[in-house]
Image (cartoon, grey):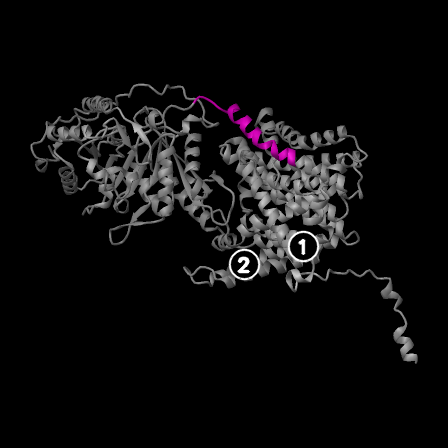
Amino acid sequence: MADLQLILQPDIEKLNKTILCYAETIYRLNGLWEGPDPLTPLISLFLIQLTFSMCFVHLLLVLLKPFNQPPFVTEIIGGILLGPSAFGRFTAYRRFLFPSFSFKILEPMAHLSITYYAFLVGLKMDVKSVVRTGPAAAKVAVAGSFIPFLVGSAVYFAFPLNASSKAGFVFWGAALTVTGFSVLTRILDLHQLLHTEIGKTAAGAALITDISGWGLLAISFAITSTYSNVEWSIISSAAYVLFCAYWLRPALGWIILRTPEGQGYSEFYICAIVSGMSLSGVVADMCGTHPMIGAFVFGLVIPNEVLEAAIVDKLEDFVVGIMMPVYAVVCGLRFNIDSVGYETSWFIVVLIVVLVCSVKIISCLAVSLFADFSAGDAVAMGLLSNAKSIMVLFFLEAGQIQGVLSTQAYSIMVMAVLVMTVTVTPAAKWFRPMQNAVPYNRRTIQKAKSNEILPILACIYTMRNVPAVINILTTSNASESSPIAVYALHLVELVGRATTMLIVHTSRKAGGHRNPSSVEAQADQLITAFDNYELRSEGVTTEVLTARCPYTTMDDDVCTIAEEKHAAFIVIPFHRQINEEGEMEDVDPSIRTVNEGILANAPCSVGILIDRGFAEKCDRATNIAVLFFGGADDREALAYAWRMASKPDVKLTVVRFLSSAEAAAAAAASSAAGRAPMDQIDTNHMSVHIDYEGEKLLDDDYLSTFKSATIKSNSISYCELVLNDEEEAIKAIKSMDEHEHDLYMVGRGRGMLSPLTSGLADWCDCPELGPIGDLLVTSEFESKFSVLVMQQYTKANKQRDIHQSSFRTASSVSYGEEVPIRPSVSDSEVFESFDSFRKWNHED
């Protein structure tokens, strides 16, 4: 009996405890037969919420696309519309889609999504880029962190905003310090401001504040989570970060190095990394911060860019496209427009929004007093720095979860964040024309003056391109009276880093990195190679740049940098390289697409450089041949070759190919049958109107000038071949291989309609080279040489200049100036038409 009484006696301690009761209907066991409401089970309801949220946010992306707003703005608007401020006012909607009990699964899934998102952000972030930012960006970042935090904290205490805790100022002020680096760079790149001084300074400052924001978030969590052990939480979190940086990263690097090359990374590797991310989140939570801090740090220490790219490819679409809309909805459900004006006038609310939106501008104006930029530039940088990202929502939502931010304070700040980010795009459009200036005029080599600096942008895809590029630059015959400014642009495919970045290597000292990555090691090699070229050359200045960008936008970045540097000529390597067997093989098919984009949009003349083994045996070309068929491109090739031939030891042979009367009559008959000689389809699939007779007159005029100026030179030869068809032209070109020319220079063939090339154009394997360039590259030749296919910039073919870029500077010389005649360096006999091309004599 005593035992029975002991059993029946209630446990007072257990009665006083709060027990969380979970819903029995997590999922339905027997379909519709179990009950009338199919949305009672949590799993079914969450799947519908996930589908609805994802579809609604992506629909808003389509609707708001004409306004060029970043996806972050769409996510905020979508969350607010789905919350109690809009659709949530309808009781049926709220009970049907977002009932209160559904938060037990909706909110944990939202925080799981931001944990994975933080991991992806860490993977994509390049901490070393902080070191490369200039002093102006560092000053803007420091001022843009302290001043907004102080002003935000003052506003928080000046207007109580129904605050539930004084500690809320930490999250409120920290949210104002962060600038969304990825959001800002996307806007700057869209409006061609990324490579301007304002754009680079704003982007550099945003990168610093974005990285420091994660530290602020960890400190904010530690302060508001463990009031009695704040110092231990901060110390343990800092110790874990140091452990990841100095022990975990080398260990991961050692494991990755033991993976055989070429095998890729298996599913086991990917799953192991994701599991490590989860454990890192648990450790960070144990230290007193949020699991997403641990996930971010773990992603930050992944040492291999290829592994980063593989993980991003696996996770990004799922996390960003499917899971993150759930987090946006949760943030929107916490937003309540009715609470904004609760016990506070709307005038005060507007005043608060204006104050917090202007803190970045105030901080940039303060920096302008000590930095080398004007007040107008400071206002521009301040407005651009107002771009926010999803990280700001981390701060605000975390503050509300921690119970230190009221719904009113949270809602007002979300409104301010939305206003700040929305105004960045119009600000970018507004400040573009403010920097606009007269377009530069020296866009071709033919129009360049011999006594002025010739700016050349030399693109480098791989280190194998360097010898051939330096070879052609050395052949360009720079001197003190005819200088060359070379901008060596190393184009790096964006692997594992999600943000386009242009790095200007100001240090003339290679090997400065302690543990350089592959990109840094290649940059050191480039600096060394171009430093040596500058030292052994007269009248040459070099600057090495590295552009990290995806192949899809690489051509735009090249053209933008060419405009910024006022380049007159762009050298781009061919997408094929010669192998050990002497055959041309593809390096990367994406390079071909980039080259075609550059040819279509270039703001100046372009040359495609093909090396057929010559760069390995000589450092410059001394025996040059120009194959002249006619047109602007051929005139540009002749102008460049003419510059090269100014050196006494360089031998130049110019061969003009003319069609015979019979061939011209056949071409006329073909035109009468349906082919219009005045129109030609370019390789870029555009219909270009061509004045064939006008082009021929320009050819004759330029050749006459060339022959008159070089009539006394023994090193320059000129001859004309009158041929009947393309077969004779092919034989004539192949017969030139006997003379072992080092460099063949040809035009791409736009603006030229010749019976000698009409048949070749139909069989081009590489149309971007034109018929003659394609013949020289794809045919078999015994000698080793290089080929430079030229495309001249002409007003008739310009596309980018319809909307001039915002950072072109003025030039004092008009575009239409006559071609200057160089000093007479040669004299050659003008040859009459040959009876047979087989009797052509190079020594004649």
Image side of residue 40 versus residue 639, left or right: right
Rounded to the nearest whole Å, what is the CA distance between mark 1 and mark 2? 49 Å
- In magenta, the rendered stretch is 418-438
> Which type of secondary structure does the marked residue at label 2 adopt?
helix
Q: What type is the residue that disc 1 sits on? A: Leu
Q: Quadrant of residue 574?
A: top left
Q: Nearer the viewer, residue 514 or 312?
A: 312
Total numbered labels placed on residues in the image: 2
The reply to whether the magenta stretch includes residue 428 is yes
Image side of residue 328 versus residue 575, left or right: right
Give the position of the C terminus as an image quadrant: top left
For marks 1 and 2, the one nearer the N-term is 1
Residue on which disc 2 sits? 250
Q: Quadrant of residue 723?
A: top left
Question: In the displayed structure, would residue 445 be above or below residue 177?
Answer: above
Image side of residue 79 versus residue 570, left or right: right
Cβ atoms at labels 1 and 2 below 8 Å apart? no
> Disc number at residue 39?
1
Picture residue at 50% right of the left edge, 36% below the top: 189
